[in-house]
Image (tube, coloured by chain):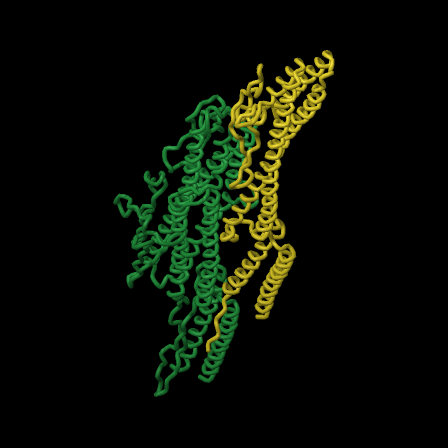
Chain colours: A green, B yellow
Amino acid sequence: MGARFTIFDAATSALSTASLGISIAGQNISNVNTPGYSKQTASLITLTPQSAGGVEIGRGVKVNSVTNSRDSFAELSLQKAESSQGKSEASSESLLAISEVFNEIDKDGLAKFMDDFFNAWQDLSNEPESTSARLNVLSKGEILSDRFNALSESLTDARENIDIKIKAIVNEVNNLATQIANITSEIKSTPGDSLALRDQRQYLVRQLANFVDVSTVENSDDDFQVYIGTGVNLVTDTTANTLGVQANISNDGLFNITIAVGSGSPQDISGKINSGQLKGLLDVRDSKIPSYQDELDELAYELVDEVNTLHAAGYDLDGDTGNNFFGSLAAIADSAANISLSATVDGNPDEIAASSTLAGIPGNNTQSLAIASLVDNTITFTSKSTTFGFYYGDLLTEIGSDTNLAINEAIFSEDVLAQAETNRERISGVSLEEEQLDLIRFQSHMQAAARLVQVAADVLQTLVELG
Amino acid sequence: MSVTRVSFGSNQIAIRTQLRKSQARYNAKILPTTTGRSVNHLYDDSSRMSNIFNTRGEIQRNQQYQANINMARIKLEYAESRISLAKDVFDRARDIALTAQDPTLSGSLSNELESQINDLKTELLTYANASFGGRYIFSGSDSDTLPFSGTPTAFNGNNVAVDIQINASVSVQVNFDGEEVFSGAGGGIDVFGVLDDLATAIGNANQTDIATEIGNIDTVLEQFLNAIADSGARSQKINAIESGILDDKLRFTTQLSDLQDADIAESISDLVKEENALRLSFESSTRIVQFLAEIRSQF
């Protein structure tokens, strides 16, 4: 009698198992496009057989577990790839913007305006008495100053724009940290494996990795720690610490990135960030742009110094000497931003000192020739001795080279990310073909189980009729 | 050997990556075709960037030196033409002096010849006081001061040489020392004094003095010829430098073209190649997606 009823048990277990299998396939299919979703798989085992009259009678099947296909190495590789991609993408985008500001390939820029300026002194030396030649020198000097000012302002703007991005990213990171802490809390309070919640959390970690390098630690009690940079604890289990920004006076008032743990005061962690968008932005803001700015400032400073030294030694049409052509600059810093015509010559062409002697005015052109010749002179800069033109050419080369490197890194990191995504997909991704086969498999399973119920019912009916 | 598992997402990543790369390669080939330059951004080929800008600078400076040469030539030729006209004055003065040497010349004719010499001096002054662009050309750097005036005619300018730079290391003097050319400073003869003395000698019918002044006229003519020869030498110097400037212009232009210009035929060929590759990418992506959809519909 026991054997007869085990048929029902086996059929019932088969029906429920097949039903669950169909559900899991349905879950997988419906989440085929869900970011971060990991394919779920039901693990089936045979129910312990029943012994009846020395014969072992099977009792059917049960779902032992439902697991998702995740590989921690693949997830970690993906996290790292996200961070690298975030860093190189942020660097290349910022540098591309700067590179376009300095792009003088298809438009006039500082290189041409420097040549125009010195050529105007050549024209003046051809006609030192000419008011129009003097006005031309003033005009070219003003254009040159304006271009220096504009480039300097663009670099300052670029740093400030990066600051705005950093602040926005800090908010994003805080948002992600809060979500991660909340999900951990849910996981801990939900019985079972919480596969979907873990997928969601892992996807949030991956998003976080794009902003900053991240590592996670989970123990057997489901405690989950998130660290960013070098050992900065962003999420302590179910508590998210808060990133913030703080103006750094010694860095032109730009933001430092801070973290506040509990009720403690914010600590600067800018130097502890090693990858992700934040690192890319910080590198460009605090390393690349200041380097360009320094070189531009030194170019402006040396140009002003050289021109003013010669100009002050010359005599203008009124017989005055000792006047600067450009306004004097106190130091190299901010020279590009502050370069301008001196108040003496601005609007006063007669104040341009073209003559080397008082007796030589108005036709002596020795001083204007000397200033015009500066274009070919070797100037001693901090890092090298070269002409103004070559110095600026080297700066353009540096910007181009940095941008080129960042673009190539971005392309490479995109490939690495695609590879890491593919690798994760290979393990965790949903294959519609597999799921459709599973659907067919479990559908057949269910049909057979239903047939089994029918057979058992028929047998039982026959027995009832015999009785 | 296990078969690599392919998920729905794997397909999408592969298609997306391939399309993006094809699109990027295609985009990279558009600009050289439309601009005619192989280098369009600082980051296109940073190793060439410094050379491009410095070559452009050389071309600009080359153009400036060409402009300087033109200006130097104009100034020099103008000054030379005034000296040449002054020389013509003395050629005519010499003819008059030879006529005046005739001892049978009547007094009225002598007076007429004296008057002609005085007129010649007036004409000479217009050449010696010639201006270019409103500036006196024989007063040195003191170009707004009338070079010669007064009786006897005195030099009011200075002896400052005015140079124009005609290449990076060469300048050429474009003015003449008026005091040297006309007043005889530095061992020459005062040309105005010669005419003054000649007029006096003719007025006095002093044959000896006239003969002396004819000798002086020859010295003046030599003085002017020396100045004209000096001008010729400077012109030759300018011509020689200009030849180099023109060679440089061609060299720099070619160099810039080599550095930044695209091979248009190659660019178009590359563009077509990438266009085809992109089209194939799109077509194959569509085909793959359609094929997978068909396969799934079989279930």
How far from the left and from the top, in percent, is residue B120?
67, 19
Q: In this view, does B72 lie above or below A403?
A: above
Seen at 37% across and 33% down, the residue is A330
In the image, A323 versus A29, the foreground residue is: A323
Confirm whether residue B21 shows in the render: yes
Which residue lies most toward the bottom here? A54
Q: Quadrant of the C terminus of chain B?
A: bottom right
- Left or right position of A358 against A241: right
Confirm whether residue A93 shows in the render: no
- Left or right position of B84 against A53: right
How far from the left and from the top, in percent, is residue A368?
50, 32
How far from the left and from the top, in percent, is residue B93?
68, 22
Count numbered badges in the picture: 0
In the image, B68 versus A154, the foreground residue is: B68
How far from the left and from the top, in percent, is residue A375?
49, 40
In the image, B46 versus A9, the foreground residue is: B46
- Left or right position of B129 against A95: right
In the image, A2 versus A174, the foreground residue is: A174
Which residue lies most toward the top here? B108
Which residue lies most toward the left here? A264
